[in-house]
Image (cartoon, rainbow, N blue to C red):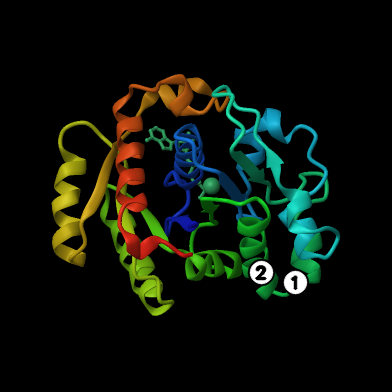
Amino acid sequence: MSQIITVHSYRGGTGKSSTAANLALLLASAGRRVALVDTDIQTPSLDVMFSDAMAPVRRSLTDYLVGRCEIEDAAYPADTDAGHGGLFLVPARNRAAGVNEIMGRGYDVGLLREGFDRLIDSLALDVLLLDTHAGFNNETVTAMASADVLVILTRADRLDLAGAGETMALAGRLGCVRMSVAVNLAPDGGVGERMRAEVESAYATKVTAVLPYAPEMASLAGERLFSTAYPHHPLVAGYRRIISEVSNGTSAIRR
Ligand SMILES: Nc1ncnc2c1ncn2[C@@H]1O[C@H](COP(=O)(O)OP(=O)(O)OP(=O)(O)O)[C@@H](O)[C@H]1O
Ligand SMILES: [Mg+2]
């Protein structure tokens, strides 16, 4: 029984990569076998967030897409503080190889979906988590179309909210029936909760979690993942709420 969870936001900097990384870590800590794929080839993050695991990186999603390796060759076990063995990472590309190669050569987008299925089978995954580029490029739309559950992040402002509406509309057209909306970077003072009410009435959708703005995240300077450094923080409680929402229910179970 495996599940593909895609994390998306219409605008950049909304917290997709941080959220995807922490969800992956928490799921793996709970004993699930998880692979986290950075499909954000243009502006990758996971190689930096998991810098220790990525240090010996030789292969990446880009290498697979241009035919240089199998997708399994680009999956690395993450050596996290939590010390469990059930988390794998697929970085988007090698920084040295640059983005020009894949943008110049292009690739068969069908390979991406094939690669997701292959990873699930060969690593015997419970969960495949996909981090995406903001907006709707080829990789992002494929990741959305592949999702059993789409986690949609929005900040607590109207610009972001309008974008989340576009994501929901496109995801619906792509056949993604299960979506979980979370408000991230919510300031103190009830703004996030007001936004919850607004999202719920505008889109007839329940907001799974209001994730607080956590200044501690900046002070970590990307050196450790938030849920490892602050396991009892309300932000981590919010990540856990998303997990319990998206992992429950049978409609998300693929096989
Ligand atoms: N709840 C939060 N509290 C405080 N800082 C946060 C929170 N969530 C994310 N951040 C910070 O916000 C910045 C953007 O986060 P992140 O890189 O995860 O966003 P993104 O949506 O993946 O961005 P991009 O669109 O560039 O890929 C990072 O510096 C991250 O540490
Ligand atoms: Mg990102």
- The answer to whether residue 236 is left or right of residue 203 is right
**Label at residue 107:** 1
Q: Measured from the top left, where is residue 107 in percent x and y?
A: 75, 71
Q: What residue type is labelled 2?
A: Glu
Residue behind label 1 places its C-beta within 8 angstroms of ligand 1: no
Q: What residue type is labelled 1?
A: Tyr
Q: Residue farthest to the right?
A: 68
Looking at the image, residue 232 lies above or below residue 155? above
Which image quarter: residue 112?
bottom right
- The answer to whether residue 68 is left or right of residue 27 is right
Q: Measured from the top left, where is residue 66 in percent x and y?
A: 81, 65
Identify the secondary structure beneath mark 1.
Answer: loop
- The answer to whether residue 36 is left or right of residue 41 is left
Looking at the image, residue 190 lies above or below residue 251? above
**Label at residue 185:** none
Mark whose residue sits in front, 2 or 1: 2
Q: Which residue is drawn at 42% across and 60% down?
A: 10
Q: Measured from the top left, where is residue 191 in percent x and y?
A: 18, 41
Residue matched to label 2: 114
Q: Which residue is drawn at 30% across and 37% down?
A: 238
Which image quarter: residue 84?
top right
Q: Which residue is drawn at 51% across and 50% down?
A: 126
Circle 2 residues within 10 Å: few <14, some 14–19, many ≥20: few
Q: Residue farthest to the bottom?
A: 173
Q: Measured from the top left, where is residue 148 in percent x and y?
A: 43, 63
Counting residues from the N terminus, which is met first, the one under dot 2 or under dot 1? Answer: 1
Q: In whole angstroms, how far apart are the C-alphas of marks 2 and 1?
A: 13 Å
